[in-house]
Image (tube, helix red, strand yellow):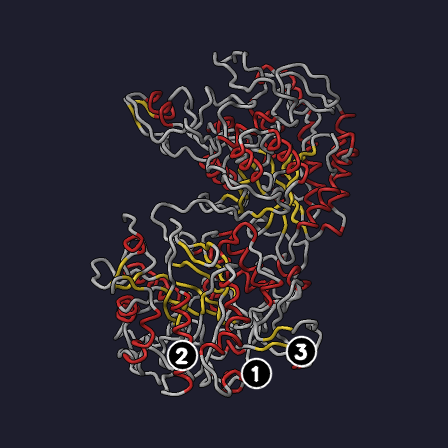
């Protein structure tokens, strides 16, 4: 089928009367939109609405009390390297334990620590505009608390009077504080009574636990807590579910599900009163046992689960246990979406003794050699020697589908209890399990560290040990005291991944070697056709292979928010713009399937892809609208679309970058228009790009996040209230990044994923003032490029990627500008994607001619010097596949250039 070329990409530039630039998002509407559930109708945001996973895309409260204790430990440490690593841990989010009535008020009665409202106020102060903030509190003062242990006994007796105090003096004040409207924008997550209900499943041989079960007082207490807390829409309730080494056996698992189901059904909201369960609180069980992934594996005629360490418990780790919990609760009538949290604060088990594999002729020998859990018995629980910090707090961890978050519920460095009698008013007694010399009923020593303080009190020796044995290891780079944590903590990429990050003014690969992103744009998915333009005439694989063979290592692909939301909703259509005679393999393929086929081809030929939300609506002229929302497409829809893309491709390093929004713009008298400052106004583009970037990186912390510029920026002494043209600096749409000097984009812990991305065009698009008179590369540098964007790379603030530049080779001023910018790009090794491949870009033309099969050799020859090359061969960004594909004679991998082995 033949299609006439469309001419719709940039007619707006010919109507400009001034240089053009960016767009922005307002804070009040943004904050409300961020808290709107993704299923809600646009325009009906309510701050207190529940979301499915409160941790996804959110920042996390850093407890200053914890940070202070970490600093004090680091100050005592003689090893400077270890002290630096200790300090870096002080910026991590940890839960706050409300372990007695005095903890609610705080102050002197609570060892000088903050009370509940003090923490909530601090969380509000840490909250970044437009980004959700979670704060986690452990509700832990059950009457007859921890009936099977002594170290963590509580202050309230197992009596009706104790229950009444629990309700009126403990739960009611907590609920009243959380209900204060000033905290409605916080996502408050609660961990309900660690070890409380689990004791009623397995420890009934203990007389105190048997009494707790028979009296029903603890179940009533938990039901009361659920009723009061669930009534608050911004509060999330997670019941403690012990850990795999306690409840992982089939009978125990059934027992806990039955008890929790009965308990929840006795609340006012029934099963809906519970948002999820949390495992491994204050325990040491690894999230995964990497060398023991099959409990039924037979060694020497014995299944691994029969080994003495596991005692026929098939759940070796918390990941397996989490899966078993979800399955069992769903079978009992609970929601399939029941959330699971895992406490990873002390389950890393790193250090020199961490095994690298498993071997042995018997199940016991094999398990002993391979398990990373180095306790002598899984039942040992107090201040365990050899333990280390586990995975850093993060929402929706990529390595654990179905887990809402990894949390540090037990603040690392707080003691589990003491084996000695220490006078206290907290109801805590010496526990033999905390005595390193005690032999347990299993015939093994407790494995506890000596000289431990009371449960919940700071333990310097334990904290130093946990940092030393952290897995993943804690960075040795010292860090300043943090005021905010993000659940987007980055872990090391898998071997062979090609993710990129930044180092000063350079984009570098996982090995730290500089790379050069040089490519082009191919539009169409952003338009009404919802698929690459040109597929009506040419073959997808042929074009992709030719781009690779010609050294285009990065392809910027424009999309629309509307299209991505259609994909997310399962409404991807089959486009009539695909010629199935030319593309028989695309017959009956939806637009999403065509896109995924393109990614497969890019992987084959060593190309990397940058996604670009070009417009809100799927419209050939959608890019002309100045901001990222339009009509029924809200700011929250924009963020949600990016989160879906980040999640869908988080394990595919073919997609390496997210250009958050194409060319936000608008002049001083236009509405809406994009601005750049430190506000949270809905039209503040800096805030919108920062918010989208953080939400993207919370899902895939390895993506490069590109923030474009705007159109205008106030001159010194002026502000955004002015409607006077003379009060502003102008530039191309997306090209004005002057605001980043005073108001830089802040991606938190993932700042090394930030790239600024201006656009620049020549006089054939619009005759800007700088094209008048005797202009040249030097005047363009001084008047336009340096003050608007090059200063960012020149000062080492961040790398640049010029996302669009290009035009027609007219033999006159436009070609003069193109040559000047190309030479500037190559001299300063600026990353770039040329506009464009498409011949149907009205005011620029493309690298292909109108038949979509013939290359414009003159234009390609012009571009070629700005493509990454080494010794006459093109260089790609894939470390395994040379650009052009396996066996390419014209392409290299970065490792071949750097001299590293593949």
Q: Position of residue 302 (x, y in %)?
A: 31, 22
> Residue 672, can we see it?
yes
The residue wearing badge 1 is 18
Task: Residue at 42%, 24% (x, y): give it.
Answer: 310
Q: Is residue 775 above or below residue 353?
A: below
The residue wearing badge 3 is 727
Mark 1 residue element: loop
Local crowd at mark 1 within 10 Å, few (<14), some, or many (≥20)? many
Mark 3 residue element: helix
Task: Residue at 36%, 79% (x, y): give it.
Answer: 846
The residue wearing badge 2 is 818
Q: Position of residue 603 (x, y in %)?
A: 31, 59
Q: Nearer the viewer, mark 2 or mark 1?
A: 2
For the residues labelled 3 and 2, say whether their Cβ atoms are less than 8 Å apart.
no
Q: Position of residue 238 (x, y in %)?
A: 61, 39
Mark 2 residue element: helix
Sequence-first disc among 2 and 1:
1
For the residues labelled 2 and 1, say whether their Cβ atoms are less than 8 Å apart.
no
Based on the displayed image, in which of its 4 quarters is residue 83 positioned?
top right
């Amino acid at each position: 089928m033949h299609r006439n070329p469309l001419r719709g990409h940039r007619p707006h530039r010919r109507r400009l009367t001034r240089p053009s630039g960016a767009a922005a998002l307002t804070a009040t509407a943004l904050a409300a939109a961020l808290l709107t559930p993704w299923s809600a109708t646009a325009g009906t945001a309510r701050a207190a609405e529940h979301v499915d996973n409160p941790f996804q895309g959110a920042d996390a409260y850093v407890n200053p009390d914890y940070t202070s204790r970490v600093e004090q430990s680091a100050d005592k440490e003689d090893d400077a390297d270890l002290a630096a690593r200790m300090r870096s841990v002080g910026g991590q989010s940890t839960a706050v334990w409300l372990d007695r009535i005095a903890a609610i008020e705080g102050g002197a009665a609570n060892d000088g620590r903050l009370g509940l409202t003090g923490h909530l106020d601090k969380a509000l102060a840490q909250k970044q505009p437009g980004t959700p903030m979670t704060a986690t509190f452990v509700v832990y003062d059950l009457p007859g608390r921890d009936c099977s242990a002594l170290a963590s006994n509580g202050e309230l007796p197992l009596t009706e009077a104790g229950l009444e105090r629990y309700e009126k003096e403990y739960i009611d004040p907590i609920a009243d504080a959380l209900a204060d409207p000033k905290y409605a924008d916080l996502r408050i997550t609660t961990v309900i009574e660690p070890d409380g209900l689990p004791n009623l499943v397995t420890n009934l041989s203990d007389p105190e636990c048997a009494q707790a079960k028979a009296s029903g007082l603890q179940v009533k207490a938990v039901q009361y807590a659920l009723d009061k807390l669930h009534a608050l829409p911004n509060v999330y309730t997670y019941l403690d579910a012990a850990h795999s080494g306690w409840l992982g056996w089939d009978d125990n698992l059934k027992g806990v599900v039955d008890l929790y189901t009965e308990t929840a059904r006795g609340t006012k909201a029934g099963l809906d009163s519970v948002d999820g369960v949390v495992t491994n609180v204050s325990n040491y069980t690894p999230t995964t046992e990497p060398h023991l992934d099959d409990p039924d594996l037979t060694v020497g005629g014995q299944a691994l689960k029969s080994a003495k360490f596991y005692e026929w418990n098939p759940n070796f780790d918390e990941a397996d246990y989490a899966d078993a919990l979800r399955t069992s609760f769903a079978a009992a009538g609970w929601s399939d979406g029941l959330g699971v949290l895992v406490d990873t604060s002390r389950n890393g088990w790193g250090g020199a003794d961490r095994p690298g594999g498993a071997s042995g002729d018997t199940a016991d020998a094999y398990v002993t050699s391979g398990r990373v859990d180095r306790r002598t018995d899984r039942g040992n629980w107090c201040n365990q020697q050899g333990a280390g910090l586990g995975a850093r707090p993060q929402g929706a961890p990529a390595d654990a589908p179905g887990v809402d978050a990894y949390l540090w519920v037990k603040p690392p460095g707080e003691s589990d209890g003491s084996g000695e009698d220490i006078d206290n008013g907290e109801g805590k007694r010496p526990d033999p399990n905390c005595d390193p010399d005690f032999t347990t009923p299993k015939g093994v020593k407790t494995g506890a560290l000596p000289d431990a303080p009371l449960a919940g009190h700071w333990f310097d020796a334990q904290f130093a040990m946990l940092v030393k044995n952290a897995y993943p290891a804690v960075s040795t780079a010292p860090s300043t005291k943090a005021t905010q944590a993000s659940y987007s903590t980055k872990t090391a990429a898998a071997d062979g991944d090609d993710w990129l990050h930044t180092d000063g003014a350079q984009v570098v690969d996982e090995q730290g070697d500089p790379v050069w992103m040089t490519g082009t744009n191919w539009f169409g998915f952003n338009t009404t056709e919802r698929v690459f333009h040109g597929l009506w005439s040419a073959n997808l694989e042929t074009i992709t292979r030719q781009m690779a063979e010609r050294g285009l290592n990065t392809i910027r692909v424009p999309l629309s928010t509307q299209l991505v939301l259609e994909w997310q909703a399962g409404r991807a259509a089959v486009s009539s713009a695909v010629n199935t005679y030319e593309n028989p393999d695309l017959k009956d393929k939806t637009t999403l399937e065509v896109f995924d086929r393109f990614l497969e081809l890019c992987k084959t030929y060593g190309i990397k892809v940058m996604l670009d939300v070009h417009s809100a609506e799927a419209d050939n002229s959608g890019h002309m609208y100045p901001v990222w929302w339009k009509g029924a497409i809200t700011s929250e829809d924009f963020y949600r679309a990016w989160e879906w893309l980040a999640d869908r491709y988080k394990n595919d390093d073919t997609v390496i970058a997210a250009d958050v929004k194409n060319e936000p713009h608008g002049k001083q008298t236009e509405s809406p228009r994009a601005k750049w400052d430190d506000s949270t106004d809905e039209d503040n583009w800096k805030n919108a790009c920062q918010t989208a970037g953080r939400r993207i990186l919370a899902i895939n912390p390895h993506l490069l996040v590109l923030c474009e510029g705007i159109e205008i920026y106030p001159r010194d002494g002026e502000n955004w209230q002015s409607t006077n043209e003379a009060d502003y600096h102008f530039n191309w749409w997306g090209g004005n990044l002057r605001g980043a000097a005073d108001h830089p984009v802040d991606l938190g812990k993932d700042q090394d994923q930030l790239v600024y991305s201006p656009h620049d065009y020549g006089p054939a698009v619009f005759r800007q003032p700088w094209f008048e008179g005797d202009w040249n590369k030097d005047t363009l540098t001084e008047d336009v490029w340096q003050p608007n964007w090059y200063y960012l790379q020149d000062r080492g603030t961040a790398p640049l990627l010029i996302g669009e530049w290009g035009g027609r080779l007219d033999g006159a001023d436009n070609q003069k500008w193109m040559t000047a910018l190309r030479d500037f790009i190559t001299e300063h090794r600026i990353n770039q994607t040329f506009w464009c491949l498409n011949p149907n870009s009205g005011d620029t033309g493309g690298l292909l001619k109108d038949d979509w099969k013939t290359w414009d050799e003159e234009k390609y020859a012009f571009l070629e010097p700005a493509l990454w090359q080494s010794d006459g061969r093109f260089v790609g960004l894939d470390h395994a596949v040379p650009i052009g594909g396996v066996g390419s004679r014209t392409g290299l991998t970065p490792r071949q250039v750097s001299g590293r082995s593949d």
